[in-house]
Image: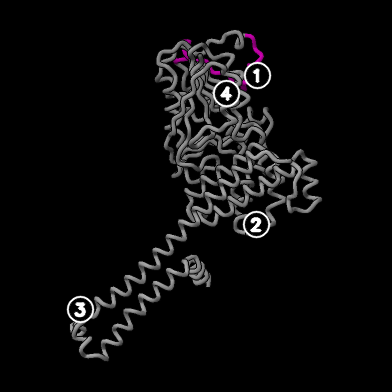
Amino acid sequence: MRAKAKLFKKIRRIPLYALLTGVASLLFSYIVVWYAHGDASLRGVLKFDQPSLFTVWQSIGVILGIFAFLCGYFDQKKANYNEANERYKEFTQLLVRERDSKMSTGFPADEVERFRNNGGTEKSLIIYDQLFSLCEYSFALYGSKIKDWARWESWLGNFFDNDPLAFLAWEIASPYYEKPFVERISEGVIGYRRERYFPSQKEWIDAAPENGKLNIVEDKTGKTLFLHQFQVMQDWEDGLMMEMANAIPENCESVLEVGYGLGICSGYLRRRKPKYHVILEPNAFLASRAKKKFEKEINNGLVEVYSNFWEDLENDERWTRRASFQGIVFDGFPLNKHELRRNHYPFFPFAARILAKSGIFTFFSDHSSHMSASTQQELFSHFTNCEISCKKISVVPAKNCEYWRSNTILHIKIQNG
């Protein structure tokens, strides 16, 4: 029954003119066949006495019918895509249009009041409703195509990462959407963002294999670093880590690396042969792994490993007075849900203070193809005289990856003026 229902839905999408043309073509072929069998002279002209030519005439009718069906189906598909684009344009116009924030929403008054009491406006609720509506339509188009839908899912996820009101807007609006779409968004986009417990700083520091809070798992999907059940890093990031390390000038005086993780970027940075390489890794177990791996370099004064959060050093005069790192690489992990997709923002002012003139700063951007306006604003507000370059890197995330689904990631490089 489900297969028949799906077939019927697809047939319903074909325009009427295509259905009629297809049916007419099929009928034409069989009418000619039927009439020719009764008319000897026409049968002679069409040479139906020859079985192969009889089959050709039938085939022509069938091919014309199928061709008409396909033309209609793809015309309708194109129309659907065009409608999705129009809805996207309407959404973006609604975002930038200057209108009174107090307007009718169509939602129950008590729900609107609850949204307002949490700092929202009627206008922002309407914009979120338009966003969810656009994504629902796109889900109907792309839901079965994992890669295509992943881009929409990632885009929608950014709203939930950057604005706590998105959760409340979804709670108010979701009862008005189709169940499959609601389930997909609730599980794939909202679920882990809302329900995950973020440990305290001490718990981050103390996580280790011995207490079961840190694990490095290697299986057919690759290598994964887990801290408190979070996927902190996977080895599919190798290409990006190499690009970030290669942004740092060879033989530079000093480089600061924030976040050791699996040690991929550290390995590439050592190939750049900096004269002084500082690694900040707050987790004690991972810091000890870094010390063991670079024991020789540490003894030679080339590498130092600190088991600290970067925030611990922000007000340390030994760091703030230096302003001498020729390279800074940031690949930290968000410590709470408010830092999701934006944990690099608080680091920008500190990086600007300790980055040497003409120095290079790069970070895990959380952008798949284009730098967002908010990231540009944050960068330019702290790096007042700089050059920014972007490069789209092709990646193949593991199938079980929770934090990245796009097949590209943006590498951003800032050169201090």
Q: What residue type is labelled 1?
A: Asp
Q: Is residue 267 left or right of residue 325?
A: left
What is the span of residues highlighted in magenta in the rendered image? Answer: 297-317
Q: In this view, does 188 lie to the left or right of 51?
A: right
- Residue 400 image point, x, y percent: 51, 45
Q: What residue type is labelled 4?
A: Leu
Marked residue nearer the N-terminal end (2 or 4): 2
Q: Can residue 163 be seen in this view?
A: yes
Marked residue nearer the N-terminal end (3 or 1): 3
Separation of residues labelled 4 and 1 (CA atoms)? 22 Å
Marked residue nearer the N-terminal end (3 or 2): 3
Q: Which amino acid does label 3 sit on?
A: Ser
Q: Can residue 299 be seen in this view?
A: no
Q: Is mark 1 on a helix, strand or loop?
A: helix
Marked residue nearer the N-terminal end (4 or 1): 1
Disc number at residue 379? 4
Q: Which of marks 3 and 1 is in front?
A: 3
